[in-house]
Amino acid sequence: MKIIVHIDEADQWQEALAEAFPDAQVLTSSAPAEERQNADYLAVWKAPAHLLEEQTRLKGIINLGAGVDHLLRTPGLPRQVPIVKLRDAGMGELMADYVLYGVLHFYRSMDCYAAQQQRATWQPQDVVAKSQWPVGVLGLGAIGRYVANVLHQAGFPVLGWSRSPKQITGVRCYHGDDGLGELLGQVQTVVTILPDTAATQHILDARRLAKLPEGASVINPGRGSLIDEQALLEALGSDSQPGHIRGALLDVFEEEPLPDNHPLWQHPRVLITPHMAAPTPLSDAIDQVIAYIKAFEAGDSVTTIDPEAGY
Ligand code: NDP
């Protein structure tokens, strides 16, 4: 069996997979071209097109992250080969920390206090009951569902939205276009944890942002393509003319790194983080990849992604 790894920490992956599969040849993508051919498995994050194009007998491709948007856009991706991706693998907990931080930032008026500090203003803000602060979670997959549960346990009413209907304890679930509109009209904070697909591009556009109640906030740790950034800037308004969106915590952007001159950097009510919401914990990810390869080899069923749906 031949496994090729392509990711930043490829040496650690190579070592761990070689230990798990002592009879296998485990290479990194920096191996000479002739050695890279005829791999059985690719374990990759942002693979170069040539690595995919040169393979002839792959049994599986393992995406070393939760989002398969980059992989599905890579030229030379063999369409008939099953693709699996990391599911949770420790990312749910990290994402839940990030989102809870963001929800509390707005719920406990930390944005107001940051602005007040600039003016040396000592002015406590009212605190409403958490029951008055419904949070919408768009995307109820491995990570979104984890986040929804943590928000529910923290005491916030949680409304969730997904493509297919769901029943999740503690989460009021919606689906479909009408469901999204209904959800947006009720939430104080909306969190986007959807994949980047043809159907989710600019899912929060001007029309949908306008459905959010006055003073609502937006948290996007999913993908930059989910939000129309220009529409968000307009909905945020300026200090002299505030719009109906109170603020945003953004981890992902249409262009990354966010260009130096992008107006989002300068907006006083936008918090920016550099795509760090849920980095993949290495040991959890390695364990999951080992389990995938064992399942492929044993002929057991694995949950593959749906290339048509894009996730
Ligand atoms: P999953 O594939 O497990 O789940 C995706 C969810 O989105 C599902 O609930 C799915 O619905 C829903 N969905 C997909 N398309 C639509 C649609 N058109 N309309 C409504 N709902 C839709 O993904 P994960 O939870 O593992 O990850 C979600 C995303 O988070 C990743 O794709 C990635 O972009 C992002 N991410 C960001 C990170 C960061 O550090 N910033 C780290 C990790 C992930 P259904 O359940 O019906 O299929």
Image (tube, grey):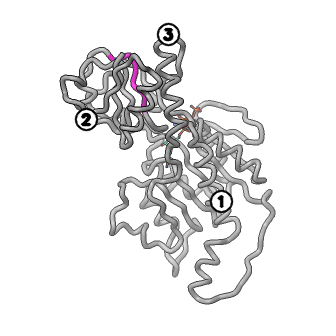
**Residue picked out by circle 2:** 30
Mark closer to the observer (3, 2): 2
Task: Determine whether label 3 and label 2 are within 8 Å by CB.
Answer: no
Task: Determine whether label 1 and label 3 are within 8 Å by CB.
Answer: no
Crowding at label 2, few (<14), some or many (≥20) Cα neighbours within 10 Å?
few
Mark closer to the observer (2, 1): 2
Which residue is at a point 52% across and 79% down the rendered structure image? Answer: 239
Task: Determine whether label 2 and label 1 are within 8 Å by CB.
Answer: no
**Residue picked out by circle 1:** 103
**In the image, which residues are magenta?**
58-63
Q: Which amino acid does label 2 sit on?
A: Ser
Left or right: 75 as drawn, with respect to 7: left
**Residue picked out by circle 3:** 299
- Quarter residue 230 falls in: bottom left
Q: Residue 205 appears at what percent x and percent y?
A: 48, 53
Element type where label 2 sits in the image: loop
Is residue 307 in sight in this rendering?
no
CB of mark 2 near ligand 1 (< 8 Å): no
